[in-house]
């Protein structure tokens, strides 16, 4: 079976398990939910295939911690949804992916981070880069669910920290 068929099987198993565990409500609405999940998965996988076949996942739910100097010393820690490593080609040695099920923010991630509105991704990028021996990396949000756009990925450019090296320092 293909990756898509295996994942569709996992979705079907999860729905069957939920049905065995507890009442699922009206059959019609349950079926709509199941079909929506399968459709969202197919759409996401099609976009993901275009987004980086040269990467392979190396960590899921990866804990990171460290200290950064942001005008003052700040202790940071968190869990990165996914860390991928580049297997071919040149460019970033790794990428981090943060999955989101809510609405898509307007504007670039760089602008939102500079405004202090979306700091999680650039901070995770800096901490994971340190764990990867200072190698370059990139980061992206991956939007999943019914509200996800046609292209569910929003990237933080690799140069984000290179352009701001003096503003923020990881220690």
Image (spheres, helix red, strand yellow):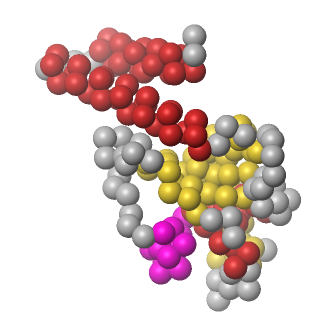
Picture quadrant where residue 155 is located:
bottom right
- Residue at the image point whose x is 53% and y is 79% from the top: 114
Q: Position of residue 27 (x, y in %)?
A: 17, 16
Q: Is residue 119 left or right of residue 137?
A: left
The residue positioned farthest toward the bottom in the image shown: 71
Q: Position of residue 162 (x, y in %)?
A: 73, 75
Q: Which quarter shows the N terminus? A: top right
Mark yes or no: residue 105 visible. Answer: yes
**Which stretch did the figure color magenta?**
108-120
Let me know if residue 93 is in the magenta part.
no
Picture quadrant where residue 21 is located:
top left
The residue positioned farthest toward the right in the image shown: 133
Give 39 or 7, whichever is nearer the viewer: 39
Let me know if residue 115 is in the magenta part.
yes
Q: Position of residue 131 (x, y in %)?
A: 79, 57
In the displayed structure, would residue 168 be above or below residue 6?
below
Picture quadrant where residue 73 is located:
bottom right
Mark yes or no: residue 61 visible. Answer: no
- Residue at the image point whose x is 26% and y is 27% from the top: 33
- Residue at the image point whose x is 72% and y is 40% from the top: 54
Q: Is residue 18 left or right of residue 6?
A: left
Q: Which quarter shows the C terminus? A: bottom right
In the displayed structure, would residue 109 be above or below residue 33?
below
- Residue at the image point whose x is 43% and y is 14% from the top: 13
Give 103 or 67, whichever is nearer the viewer: 103
Q: Is residue 93 left or right of residue 105?
A: right
Q: Position of residue 62 (x, y in %)?
A: 66, 46
Number of numbered discs present?
A: 0
């Amino acid at each position: 079976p293909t990756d898509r068929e295996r994942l569709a099987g996992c979705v079907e198993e999860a729905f069957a398990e939920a049905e065995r565990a507890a009442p699922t409500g009206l059959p019609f609405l349950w079926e709509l939910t199941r079909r929506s999940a399968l459709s969202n998965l197919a759409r996401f996988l099609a976009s993901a295939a275009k987004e980086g076949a040269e990467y392979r996942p190396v960590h899921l739910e990866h804990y990171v911690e460290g200290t950064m100097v942001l005008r003052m010393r700040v202790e940071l820690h968190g869990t990165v949804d996914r860390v991928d490593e580049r297997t071919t080609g040149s460019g970033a040695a790794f990428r981090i992916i943060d999955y989101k099920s809510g609405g898509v923010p307007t504007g670039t991630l760089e602008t939102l981070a500079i405004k202090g509105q979306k700091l999680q991704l650039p901070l995770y990028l800096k901490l994971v880069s340190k764990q990867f021996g200072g190698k370059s990396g990139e980061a992206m949000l991956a939007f999943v669910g019914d509200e996800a756009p046609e292209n569910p990925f929003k990237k933080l450019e690799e140069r984000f920290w290179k352009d701001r090296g003096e503003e923020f320092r990881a220690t």
